[in-house]
Image (cartoon, rainbow, N blue to C red):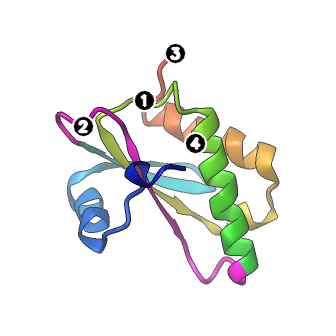
Amino acid sequence: MKKELRIKKNQEFQDAFKNGRSFANRQFVVYALKKEGQPYFRIGLSVSKKIGNAVMRNQIKRYVRQSVLELMDQIMPENDYVIIARKPVAEMDFSEVKKSLTHVLKVGKVLRK
């Protein structure tokens, strides 16, 4: 994933938490914050240490990034998204992660038809 598509700064995460709208399912919580004039969307990932060791957390982040890349043309631009993984993600493979992430983005109405 390109650097301009990532959220890295703590302040940007906090803005999404405070001012963004959230939607969730059992595996993910997603915060979406509207950014006017931004031609693309940006993604921030958060995986808690409670979920597993570093290897497991990095695998989950890779799965989420790849899912977002495959859904890139369907996700609404001009938004910042913060994706928080919950515990059930640890037992999922890539296809299940992608399916769950697609579901939560549809619930939030940020996927184009």
Q: Mark 1 vs mark 3: give the one in front.
A: 3
User: In front: 72, or 14?
Assistant: 72
Residue type, mark 3 in image: Lys
Q: Which residues are magenta?
A: 35-54
State the SS at label 3. Answer: loop
Q: Residue at x 38, y 50 (%)?
A: 4
Residue receiving disc 3: 113
Residue receiving disc 2: 38
Q: Residue at x 31, y 69 (%)?
A: 9
Residue receiving disc 1: 109
Relative side of 92 to 84, left or right = right
Q: Residue at x 60, y 83 (%)?
A: 49
User: In front: 77, or 20?
Assistant: 77
State the SS at label 4. Answer: helix
Residue receiving disc 4: 68
Pick out the residue farthest to the top: 113
Q: Earlier in the sequence, mark 1 or mark 2?
A: 2
Residue type, mark 2 in image: Gln
Q: Mark 2 vs mark 3: give the one in front.
A: 2
In the displayed structure, 103 sits above or below 11; it is above
